[in-house]
Amino acid sequence: MARRATTLMLLLALAAALSGCGSAPDGDSTPTPTATSQQTATSPAESDPSPEPPRRIAPFPGPDDLAEVLGDAERALADPGTPEAERTRWAHAHQQAYRDLAANPEWREPVRNALPDAFRETFDATFRAVRQLRQLHTPESDVPSGWEIHPPPPLDELRGYYEEAEQAHGVHWSVLAAIHLVETRFGRIHGDSYAGAQGPMQFVPETWQAYGDGDVHDPRDAIMGAGRYLSASGAPDNLRQALFAYNRSEHYVAAILAHAEAMRLADHYADTYHRWRVYFRTDDGDVVLEEGYGT
């Protein structure tokens, strides 16, 4: 516990470097061009200034500090006794560490070598995912004014929808959860893409008309629609083909498969990912869009 307290102090010191509105790097939380859309950025819309301005995130100074924080984060997140609020802080540190690793892939080996063996498989899968997503997205000049960031539905509720869709359409729940994570950070992001993709699973209207049933903005309806569309596109037998139909990017396909693998490897990883925040990558660095942004 003393070690974790020391690391939390380091996290607070890093958090003190947060500054107000600005541009930022890496868009792994940008709603991607889903369900046959080929655009990856969302369209900025005219809106009033947000009551929750984006905050720029200071990167880790180097691999040693990152490895220390990530190791303690992995331990805390794997420990069922970690208090709820502390678990969320560790999940935020975990996310920032992987984003910085994606931006500095030369840090991968020293960080991996510093981790206990028990965490290396999930490390490999998560690193692959965030690295692929960083290659998929390019920085924007500014944060999107057309987004709203809301709290996501509870994970237990979402897990029920994923498993219902798996039973109906044969797509493993972890794949649906990974899509939900990448598309809208489990429904936190409310906003359409440049191509008009909508809802928590980001369907373009034509695809939703063909494969959806109900409200594209409803989590259950959207998750069931995603399972239905993936099944019609070849899943589960040809999951790669189905994911490529969902979003025509090999980077996207690799990222979804890697995030899904991490959730299958470790029971707590779905909860960890569910706590990840909405980052946006701009020309000047990473910013966090907190819940309440744009509302």
Image: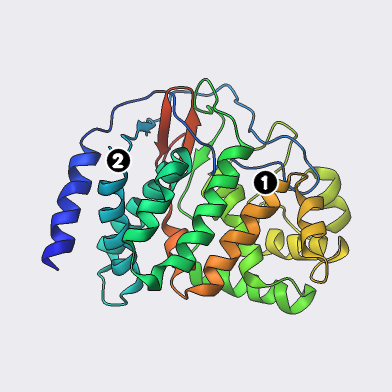
Q: What residue is shown with label 2?
A: 62
Res 254 quadrant in image: bottom right
Q: Position of residue 143 (x, y in %)?
A: 49, 27
Q: Is residue 131 above or below residue 3?
A: above
Mark 1 vs mark 2: give the one in front. 2
Q: Residue placed at 66% from the left, 42% from the top?
A: 32
Which amino acid, by three-letter code, is at mark 2? Gly
Q: Residue furthest bottom?
A: 167
Gap in angstroms between the C-alphas marked 1 and 2: 26 Å
* 225 on left or right of 275: right
Q: Is residue 140 above or below residue 291?
A: above
Res 181 quadrant in image: bottom right
Q: Residue placed at 53% from the left, 66% from the top?
A: 262
Picture quarter with the N terminus: bottom left
Q: Tell me, yes or no, if residue 268 can be seen here.
A: yes
Say which mark, if any, is on residue 251: 1
Packing grade of label 1 (10 A; few <14, some 14-19, many >=20) is: many
